[in-house]
Image: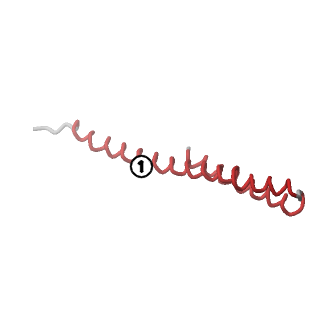
Amino acid sequence: MFIKEAAYIKQVKHNLQDLKGVLEDGDRIGEGASVIYNEMDEIVIMHVESLCFALSQAAEITGKIIQEMLELEERTSRIFVWRPA
């Protein structure tokens, strides 16, 4: 689940950057536009990148936990194997 969400957020980031590029290429000009571009870079895109990183880390850690649990289940299930005398 985290992997899909990280990929989606990464795509959102690219879309934001593309839209910002369109604006910077002439759709919005002036001092106010510069402030908006800076806010997008310093606040919006930065936080979207942080969210993407956090989701990627969550996917990695969750995968490791799942692997550990499967290995633990395998090891502990050996205790209950019936062996005739």
27 displayed left or right of 84: right
> Residue 79 at what x, y percent from top left?
21, 38
What element does badge 1 sit on? helix
Total numbered labels placed on residues in the image:
1
| Residue at the (86%, 57%) spot, across then down | 31
What amino acid is found at the position of numbered circle 1 in the picture?
Lys
Q: Nearer the viewer, residue 30 or 4?
A: 30
Q: Nearer the viewer, residue 1 or 22?
A: 22
Relative image position of residue 5 (x, y in whole percent): 61, 46
**Which residue, as the protein is rendered here, is positioned at the far front?**
31
Where is 63 relative to 20, above or below? above
Camera-side residue: 9 or 27? 27
Q: Outermost residue, bottom direction?
A: 25
Residue beneath label 1, please?
64
Give above or below for 38 relative to 76.
below
- In the picture, residue 35 is in which quadrant? bottom right
Residue pictured at 62% horizontal, 52% vertical: 7
Where in the figure is residue 71, as x and y percent of width and height? 33, 46
Q: Is residue 84 left or right of residue 72?
A: left
In the rendered view, does 31 fall on the left or right side of 11?
Answer: right
